[in-house]
Image (cartoon, helix red, strand yellow):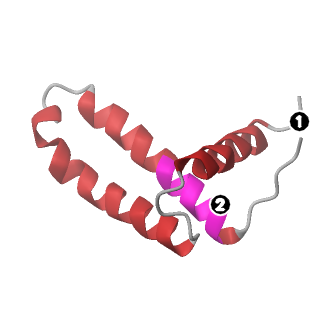
Amino acid sequence: MVTTLTLHERAAAQAYIRLVETAQAVLTDPVLAPMAGAYLSSSMAEADEALRSAGLSGNEAELMRWVAALRAADRGPS
């Protein structure tokens, strides 16, 4: 099934992916982990704003569908 995302939906999914990837990188680095809040604050703010712009604040299930659609599109056709 192909899911077509609006610009706001795509931005929200991309912001979430960036936040998750940044969190993984920071939290797995013993030097950076103690400063995770400082490193993640801009990524969290970006994700929050993107979710608000997409009208999605508080609707994680829909966000996960968008993220899955974006990841599937990035992988290309099977």
Residue 60 inside the magenta-drawn segment: no
Identity of the residue drawn at 63% across and 51% down: 62
Label 1, label 2: how many angstroms apart (C-alpha)?
18 Å
> What secondary structure is found at the residue carrying circle 1?
loop
Relative to the observer, which residue lies in front, 57 or 12? 57
72 above or below 62?
above
Along the horizontal axis of the image, is 3 left or right of 9?
right
In this rendering, the answer to whether 47 lies above or below 25 is: below
Name the spot of residue 56 as percent of width and height, x first: 55, 63
Q: Amino acid at mark 1?
A: Pro
Q: On residue 10, which mark appears?
A: 2
| Secondary structure mainly formed by the magenta segment | helix
Q: Quadrant of the C terminus?
A: top right
Q: Residue at x 75, y 38 (%)?
A: 72
* Residue 42 on image: x %, y %: 29, 61
**Which secondary structure, mark 2?**
helix
| Magenta part of the chain | 8-16
Residue under the image location 27 percent in, 50 percent down: 40
Image check: 2 left or right of 39? right
Q: Is residue 67 left or right of residue 24?
A: right
Q: Position of residue 5 (x, y in %)?
A: 75, 60
Q: In this picture, is 32 found above or below 65?
A: above
- The residue closer to the viewer here, 50 or 57, is 57
Instruction: First in sequence, mark 1 or 2: give its number.
Output: 2
Label 1 packing within 10 angstroms: few (<14), some (14-19), many (20+): few
**Who is closer to the viewer here, 28 or 53?**
53
Q: Quadrant of the N terminus?
A: top right
Quarter assignment of residue 29: top left
Q: Amino acid at mark 2?
A: Arg
Q: Residues within 10 Å of mark 2 (few under 14, many from 20)?
A: some
Quarter of the image for residue 76 reads: top right
Question: What label sits on residue 77 in the rendered view?
Answer: 1
